Image (spheres, coloured by chain):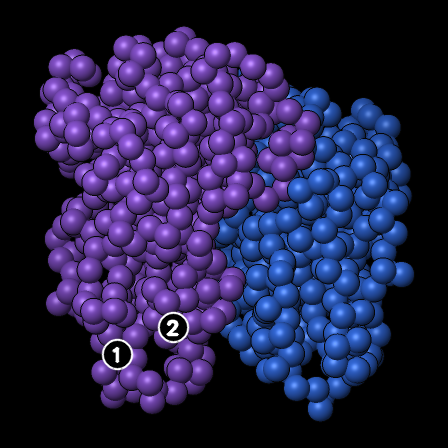
Chain colours: A blue, B purple
Amino acid sequence: MTPNASTFVANARTYSPSARPVVVVCLDGSADEYLDAAMARGKMPNLQKMAVRGYRGFARGALPSFTNVNNASIITGVPPSIHGISGNFFLDPQTGEEVMMNSAKYLRAETITAAAARAGRKVGIVTAKEKLRDILGHGLFDSLNTLGAQDSTRGIAFSSEKAPEAREKTHGISDVERVVGRRTPEIYSGDASLFVFYAGVALIESQRADFLYLSTTDYIQHKHKPEDPAALEFYAEIDTQLGRMLELGAILGITADHGMNAKCKPDGSPNVIYLETLLRETFQLEFKVILPITDPYVLHHGALGSFAVVHGPSTAPFEKIAKWLLDLPGITEVHDRATAAAKLELPADRIGDLIVLSGRDTVIGRTPAHHDLKAVASGLRSHGGRYEEMVPFIISEPLNDAYAVRAASDPRNFDIFDFACNGTVR
Amino acid sequence: MTPNASTFVANARTYSPSARPVVVVCLDGSADEYLDAAMARGKMPNLQKMAVRGYRGFARGALPSFTNVNNASIITGVPPSIHGISGNFFLDPQTGEEVMMNSAKYLRAETITAAAARAGRKVGIVTAKEKLRDILGHGLFDSLNTLGAQDSTRGIAFSSEKAPEAREKTHGISDVERVVGRRTPEIYSGDASLFVFYAGVALIESQRADFLYLSTTDYIQHKHKPEDPAALEFYAEIDTQLGRMLELGAILGITADHGMNAKCKPDGSPNVIYLETLLRETFQLEFKVILPITDPYVLHHGALGSFAVVHGPSTAPFEKIAKWLLDLPGITEVHDRATAAAKLELPADRIGDLIVLSGRDTVIGRTPAHHDLKAVASGLRSHGGRYEEMVPFIISEPLNDAYAVRAASDPRNFDIFDFACNGTVR
C-alpha cells in the first residue's frame, strides 16, 4: 500500500481508501434529470467521461428525502435509524419543543470523516449551508470530539455561507476566502454551491486535504427545471470543477441527498394538503403536524415537502386516522411509528404517531397560516417523499467485480464512501 | 388544419394529432439507465437531439409495472382501474381459473388507435410479443370490433413474433416479411424488438400508416445491464431507426411500460420471497398467490416479479396477515383490495384480497416448485413494483406552454399519445 493510504472502521464498516485524494460529493437536490439535461447538451463532458470509464446509476437515498437526514447518512454510512437524524426539524420528545435538528448533539453515530482523520487522512469538509457544518464536522474538533482525542484539530470543516467565520481552532482553517481565492457567496444562489467546489479544488491543490466531503445546496434545483439555462450553466460549472479534481488525481464519488419534483397542479399552482387543518377539523383533536423539511432557508421551499409527522393525543384513534389519511388524494403512504421505524429506517423515538408521505406532485403543509406561498410564487419544486428517493450514484473509476454486482442490486446513497474507498479497481 | 389531420375522442380525452406521422413508442423494460448508458457513449445521437429540441423527463407508469397493464394503459390513455387489465395473468373470479390476460375480451376501454382509425388516420400497430396483439389491435378489425364498424379492416396490427401469420382480414396486412424486408426474428432476442422499428419505418415509408404504436419486448433488459455491450448495441440500432422516422417527418413520443432492476442479493444470487409457501406455513390456510408477471416468456424473468396478489379463504384474518407481511424484509407495501383499487388505480374485481409489493432488489415467488431459477441463472433482472414505476418520457418536438407545465408535474406514461397529439408547438 502507498504511504498515506489507510484502513479504518466507522460504524462497523471498514474503509480502505486509495492514497490518492478521495472526494465524495453530495449534490443537494440533484434529481437525475439535471444531469441528463446538461449532458444531452454537452455541458458535462467530465461527468460523461466518468460515467463511461467508471459507473453511473441510481441509488436509493434515506427517507425522508431531506438534506440533513441524507447528509448525516452519507457521512456516517448508516441509515437514520442508527445515526438518529430524522429530519431538518423535529419535535424533541425530551423538551416538547419544535427544534432544528442541526446540532451534532443529535447524532448517534460517528462520522466516516472523523475515523479517516484518526487514521491519518487529511480531512476536508465543505458544505454550502452552515446548518450542516456541526453534524458533518462531528468528531474533528475538540469542542465536538467525544472520542477522547488529544490534538486540537484533525481536519477542516467550513461552510460557504459562513466562510469568513472559519478559524483554525473550530474549523481547522482560517482566511478561507484567501485560500479559495473567491469572495463568500450569497446563500440564495448557485454560487453558494460552486464555492464548495472551488474550495474543494483549493484544498486538494494546496495539499491541505486528501479525503473530502463536499455538500452543496439546492437553491438552483428548487428554483429551476433541469432544462432552464440557469440550471444548465450551474451544472456546466460544476463539471469544470469536477474536471479539475480529476486532473489532481482524485477518485470521485458523486451522489445526491434527494431528488426534486414540481409539486404543482396541472395548471402550475402549488398542490398543497394542509394536514394539521384537515386533521383538527375532521377529528376535533389537538393534532400537531411537524414538517421535517423546515429549515432556515424558506425561499427554497416554503417549508412544504412530501413528508409529514403527525403527533396527536394518546387517546386519538390512530388506526382509523391512518386509513382516513390514506384515502386523501395525493397521500401515498401512512405508517404508524413502529412500521415507519422498520420500513423507513427511522429512529422510533424521534418521529411521531403517524408518518405521512405524499405523491410526486403533492406537498404537505401544516395550516395555511404556517406557509408563505409568495416565497414559492415562481413555481413550487420540492422533495421529501418516495418520488425523490432515487438519486444519481457515480464513481469516477471502474468498479471491481464485487462492487459492480452491488451497484446493480440496491446500493444506497450512503454507500458512496464505501464505493469510493473500497469499490474501485486498484 | 392540413388535409389528413383529425380530431377524435377516446375514453373522454380529446386528441388532435398533426397531419405528420405520429409515432408512439413503448420501449419495454427500458429503465432510464439504458438511455443514459447509451447516450453517455454517444450511441444515441438522435435521442440526444430529441431531448434537446423536444423534451426528456420521467413519467409515472401504471402499477403493477408489467407489460400488459402498461401497454393497455398507453393505448387507451387511462389507468387499469378503467381499462381493466390488471396484469399479464390473473385469477378470473368468474371461472375460478388462473388465466393469461392477453385477450381483448378483458379490455373495458376503447383504444386511442381505433378512435384514430375511425377519424381517418392510417393506423399501424407493431408489437414484438404476439401476446399483446389482441389487446392493442382491439377495435380495428371486424372480429374484434364492438363499435358497429362497417369496413372489414381499418388499420394494421401485427407482431414480430408471428409476422408471417399476418393476413389482410385479421391484421390489415399480409406478406409482412416482404414489406419490412427482413426475416421474422427469434422472440428471445433483441432482434424481436428491432423488427418492430424496421416495420414501423417501412409502414411510414410506404405510406401504409401515419398513426403508429410500436411496442418492443424486454428480452435485452432482462438479460443485460445498461452498460453491457449487447444493451449498448441494441439501443444504438434503435436510435438509428428513430432517426429514420424523424427523417420521414414523424412526431415521436417515446416511453416505457416499466423499468428494470437486478433482483439480487449483494452476492448476485436471486433474492426471492416464496410468498405462498410462507403464508401457508405461517397461517395454515389455503392461500393462493398469483404472480401477474407470469406470461409465456419465462426465459425473461422466471415468472418472478415485485408484485403479487394474495387470494385467501374469506375467513382469513387479512388485517393481521397484512401487518405480518409488511414486517417481512424486502416487502415494501401491502394493501387490501379497496386500498389497492384506490391508491394503485386497479380494477377491484380483478385483484385479490391483498396486494403485495417488494423492493428494488427483491422479487416475490409462489413456491420454490413454481419457479425454475435455471431460466434466470445468468442474473435475475425484473420489475413489477414501485422501483420500476418511473419511466422515460420523451417527445421529439418542443412542448407548448400548457404541456411544458404538465410535463414538469406528474405526467403518466399513458399520457404519451396526448402529449404527442396535443402537446407540441404547432
The picture quadrant where one finds residue A279 is bottom right
Identify which residue is drawn at 76% across, 31% down: A190
Q: Is residue A161 left or right of residue A262?
A: right
The picture quadrant where one finds residue B304 is bottom left
Q: Is residue A224 left or right of residue B425?
A: right
| Depth check, front residue: B409 or A31 | B409
Chain identifier of the residue bearing label 2 in the image: B
Identify which residue is drawn at 76% across, 44% down: A269
**Element on which disc 2 rests:** strand
Q: Disc 2 marks which residue?
A: B354
In the picture, the quarter occupied by the C terminus of chain B is: top right
The picture quadrant where one finds residue A385 is bottom right
* Place of residue A312 in the rendered image (x, y in percent of width and height, measured from the top left): 74, 81
Q: Disc 1 marks which residue?
A: B287
- Please tell me how many numbered marks the rendered image carries: 2
Above or below for A12 versus A362: below
Amino acid type, residue under disc 2 in the picture: Leu
* Place of residue A281 in the rendered image (x, y in percent of width and height, measured from the top left): 79, 75
**Element on which disc 1 rests:** loop
Amino acid type, residue under disc 1 in the picture: Phe
Q: Is residue B314 left or right of residue A332?
A: left
